Structure formats: structure tokens, C-alpha cells
Amino acid sequence: MLNVPSQSFPAPRSQQRVASGGRSKVPLKQGRSLMDWIRLTKSGKDLTGLKGRLIEVTEEELKKHNKKDDCWICIRGFVYNVSPYMEYHPGGEDELMRAAGSDGTELFDQVHRWVNYESMLKECLVGRMAIKPAVLKGMLPKSQVTDTLAKEGPSYPSYDWFQTNSLVTIAIYTKQKDINLDSIIVDHQDDSFRAETIIKDCLYLIHIGLSHEVQEDFSVRVVESVGKIEIVLKKKENTSWDFLGHPLENHNSLIPRKDTEDPYMKDSYIRKNINQRRETFIFTFNPDVVGLYYRKCQLISKENVTHDTRLFCLMLPPSTHLQVPIGQHVYLKLPITGTEIVKPYTPVSGSLLSEFKEPVLPNNKYIYFLIKIYHTGLFTPELDRLQIGDFVSVSSPEGNFKISKFQELEDLFLLAAGTGFTPMVKILNYALTDIPSLRKVKLMFFNKTEDDIIWRSQLEKLAFKDKRLDVEFVLSAPISEWNGKQGHISPALLSEFLKINLDKSKVLVCICGPVPFTEQGVRLLQDLNFSKNEIHSFTA
Ligand code: FAD
Ligand code: NAD
């Protein structure tokens, strides 16, 4: 059974007090944790008041249900009675009431787009909205979508395919030069083939039901100079294919990424008519219906790193190509007592020093995570209970960190607290090997005690090996013998740490940790006259 604390939630000063993006969470009453909610949904109680009936809801009807004890909200065309959930909502009742009797899709996406509300609220489902085109998000029937924002032009991606006796090659023309193997994610299961190509702030999706069977493994090549990606599939039978397959949902769409920083892309629907060889598909894409794609990965190993933090290694399915870009995170999904729970985690490399891991596993098939187990948490104890060989679903990557921030970089400062160290792992590896202009990297790593420091000896060895790297540990609850730095992030600690000897050097400061730590750090950096471009804070 899951051990869920019963005091007011979140605990005072807990990371749970503040949600991502700085949104405050409210104290929940005793017996109102997420686990309690899951138990209620399994109790068989009629949570909609409709005795299991699903109805079609008109806009007029929706508007009437706008009170706390009778509150309906529409998300992506589905209407939920959220009154029973009010007291369990970590963001509080008032936050939920902002969408009472209306379409809450936009608000939901702004605050916690990755929460799997379908699973969490399935017992609250009242029904679907009665179709009213151009009003409902995520419910537009394809035939009624007008192409008002369609963009034509040479910069739009396209694809083509060709074959030999034994191979089928799908070529994606991104029309961008800054693509690499991180830019393409391929999954094929049974006859369904998906390729997501990340092109600037968009995702170009190829989604096809293949006309013939192919083998599990395939190869991916990138021709950077022309922005072309080639996916080479092996036919199961050496026959000639007349056509590649039939289009599946959102095939051939250019989709704005949810984590884009570009406000135009955030708000627009981008659709386009494309003529493909023997196939004409119409872009009837609605970004609201495109969620993150998950694939099942197998737990290969789990090793203790500190008393409460483990290094998990997951293996991607053979029919997947996925490399998580530096600074990005994925979501892990597990069923917990019948409800799918999703939490974000930042992949790391298997170690900081290559000699620590022998033999080195090919990094395109394995994903590593450093994860702290909170014994009173919801997700991590379940993750910790997984046995080698068990499966966990892993999403496509998300995040707005751009590797272009490293261009011409001279001084890199990393401020990490606790597991906020995770994005710094790949950053450190990359910075010390791939940035020729780099002069200095300084890591200030905040932890409660010495026992909490992740990969301390690897960090010390790396700093010894590479003189450009300095590492300082700061403890907030040290034992009296500790003679290093102590305390919390503060103006004094930062101004000493961030001293730059040469004027006008190109600087980047990355910061990650509990939300109050990150928020305070960003404020202090601004006070020290670091510009917005010189600061990157990691949040969900
Ligand atoms: P939660 O259930 O969220 O609990 C966390 C804490 O709150 C615990 O201390 C628990 O005791 C307390 N709590 C929970 N319920 C109650 C209650 N009813 N009353 C009082 N206290 C309560 N973490 C990593 O370890 N590694 C990563 O790489 C990583 N990457 C991340 C990337 C991003 C972008 C973000 C936003 C977060 C990341 N995290 C990472 C944090 C991770 O997503 C989870 O928040 C973390 O694992 C805790 O999840 P949990 O469900 O086990 O704990
Ligand atoms: P922790 O509780 O062990 O604290 C580590 C250090 O953070 C403390 O020693 C202290 O110096 C500092 N700290 C903690 N609370 C603070 C506060 N209220 N104000 C100022 N400083 C504070 O940390 P943990 O349990 O390892 O938690 C790590 C956090 O990092 C989690 O909240 C996790 O969600 C977050 N995280 C975020 C990302 C991301 O956004 N990309 C990635 C990984 C981890």
C-alpha cells in the first residue's frame, strides 16, 4: 500500500508549495491528497450525479454549471463535473472556479498541460460538448476546419519515399540546417509508423499506417548540409510496394510545440495543404488534440547513488529512435492503483566520467535518470518498486533550453540544488567537450547534507582532470565538522561565486532546483545585473 502522509499538504516549505511556473499550491485538508482522490474514484461513488450516463452538453447547459457545488468544465471537448474534485485540487478551489461553466482548455494548458486529466477525472466525465465548430477546442470535425492561417512557402517541410527490393526509405526535407539526430523521434508499432521532427518551434509529424510489414529495427541518417532526414526501414518481404500507407491522425502536420518561446507559434493553428506523391492530405490539424507520445521502456538497471537517489537505466524499444536533447526533460508514466500518474524527469548521461561506466552502452538505446525517492511521495516509491525487466512509459522530450545558448560561450555558471543537478549533467559533459570558446565552468551545488550530494566523487575527479571546472558544495544542514560553504542561496554567496575577471565575456548562468530556490536565484542574478539572455532557469 502507498504510504501517504496525512498532515496538511503540502508540508510547510515543501517543494510542493509552489508549482511550476511559480503558481502557488494551497494547503489541502487532511484526507484530500492525490492518493485519497484516486481511492474515491475507485469507490464506485457516482461522481457526476448522472449515474454513469454520458450526455451531450450544449454551451448553454455548460454555462449553467458554474457554482462550486455544481461545477462543470470543458477540456478538449469533454465535459467534467469537477465539484467532487474541488477539495483535492492542488491549485485550490478558486483556480478551478476560474473555468467553471466554460471551456477550460487554455487555462489548463497554461498551468499543467501534462497532467493526465483524462485518467484522473474519468469518473467525473459528464459527456461531450455538442459540436459547434470554431468554438470548441480539440473537437473540430475535419471537414469544417477552415484554413485561415495556412502558410505556404519554401520553408515548409515535406516528405517523400522510395524503395529498393529490400528497403523503404522515408526522406523528410526539413528545409532547416540546424537539425541533428536529436531532432527526429521515430516509433513504429505493428503497422503504425510515426516520425516527429523538431523544426525550430514546431514539430512536423509523419503518421502512417504502413501498407506492408517491416522489420523491428531501422536506421536514421541526417544530412545536415541540406536538412534532410532519412529513415531506412527493412521490408519483411521483398515485394514492391504500390503506396507507402494510409494517413493516420495528424499525419503531415506542422504542430506548434507547447514549450515554444515564440508567442506566434503558441497561439496559432498552422495548417497547410500538401500534395505528396500519389497522396493529397489536407492539414486539418488542431494543436490542442496533439498530446505527448509515450512508448514503453524496460528497466535495465537501478543503482544507489546516495541514500535516497538512484540511477535508473531504461531501454527504448528496438522500434524507437529517441535522443533527449541537452536541457530537456521527458515525462514518466506509471499506473498507480489503476490511475495513470505522470511526472517529469531530466535524463542524464550514465556518468560524468566515461571511465566510470564500462562497457559504455550505446546512448541511443538507453536513457538514464537520477531520481530521488521520496518515501512519502506518490510516484517515486512506485518507480522504486519496479523490478528489472518491468516497463515504464516515457514521453517525447519537452523543454525550451536551446543549445545555441552555448555559441561562443566563455564563462558558464551552474547553480544546482538537490536533483536540480540533473540538467547540469549533460550540460557539463557538452560544455567541457564541445565548446571551443569555453574558458571556465563553475558549479555551485546546494544540498542539505554531505550524504545528499549526487556524484560528489565524480565531480571532484572531473574538476581535478579539467582545470576549467570548479565545483563548490554548499550545505544547508551540515554537521558541525563541515568546513565548506553553508547556508542557502544568498547575495553574498552568489556575488563571490559569479566573479568574472574579464569584462564583456559571453556568460551563461543555468539554475535548477526547488522552485523557491530557482525563483530566488533568478531574482538575485537580476539584481547582479545579469540580463535575461544570460540566465536560463529550468522549470517544467
Ligand atoms: P510527491 O508526491 O510529489 O511528493 C513530494 C514531496 O511532497 C515528498 O516529500 C512528500 O513527502 C511530500 N508530500 C506528498 N504528499 C504529501 C501530503 N499529503 N502531505 C504532506 N507532504 C506530502 N526529480 C528527480 O529526482 N530527478 C529528475 O531528473 C527530475 N527532473 C525533473 C524535471 C522537471 C522539469 C521537474 C518540474 C521536476 C523534476 N523532478 C525530478 C521532480 C519530479 O518530477 C517529482 O516532483 C519528484 O520525483 C517527486 O515525485 P513524487 O510523486 O514521488 O512525490
Ligand atoms: P532538497 O530539498 O534536498 O534541497 C536541496 C537544496 O535546495 C537545499 O539544501 C537548499 O539549499 C535548497 N533549497 C531547498 N528549499 C529551498 C527554499 N525554499 N529556498 C531556497 N533554497 C532552498 O531538494 P530536492 O528534494 O532534491 O528537490 C529538488 C527540486 O528540484 C525538486 O523540487 C524538483 O522538482 C526540482 N527539479 C527541477 C527540474 C527542472 O525543472 N528541470 C529538474 C530536476 C529537479
Image (spheres, rainbow, N blue to C red):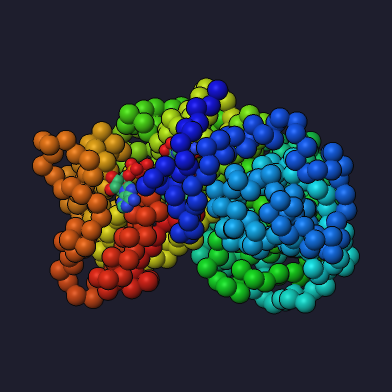
Q: Where's residue 385, x and y in %?
A: 51, 24
Q: What is the total number of numbered labels drawn onto the structure image?
A: 0
Asked whether 270 or 137 is in front, the reply is: 137
Horizontal side of residue 288 vs 56, given as left or right = left
Asked whether 159 or 69 is in front, the reply is: 69
Q: Where's residue 232, x and y in %?
A: 66, 47
Horizontal side of residue 299 vs 502, given as left or right = right
User: Residue at point 60% right, 46% down?
Assistant: 87
Residue 454 visible to an observer of this rendering: yes
User: Residue at point 70% right, 48% down?
Assistant: 83
User: Residue at point 33% right, 60% down?
Assistant: 520
Horizontal side of residue 268 vs 48, given as left or right = left
Q: Is 8 situated above or below 518?
A: above
Q: Where's residue 288, x and y in %?
A: 70, 60
Asked whether 43 or 352 is in front, the reply is: 43
Residue 212 occupies quadrant: top right
Q: Where's residue 477, x and y in %?
A: 22, 40
State the quadrant of the N terminus.
top right
Residue 136 occupies quadrant: bottom right
Residue 210 visible to an observer of this rendering: no
User: Residue at point 75% right, 34% down?
Assistant: 45
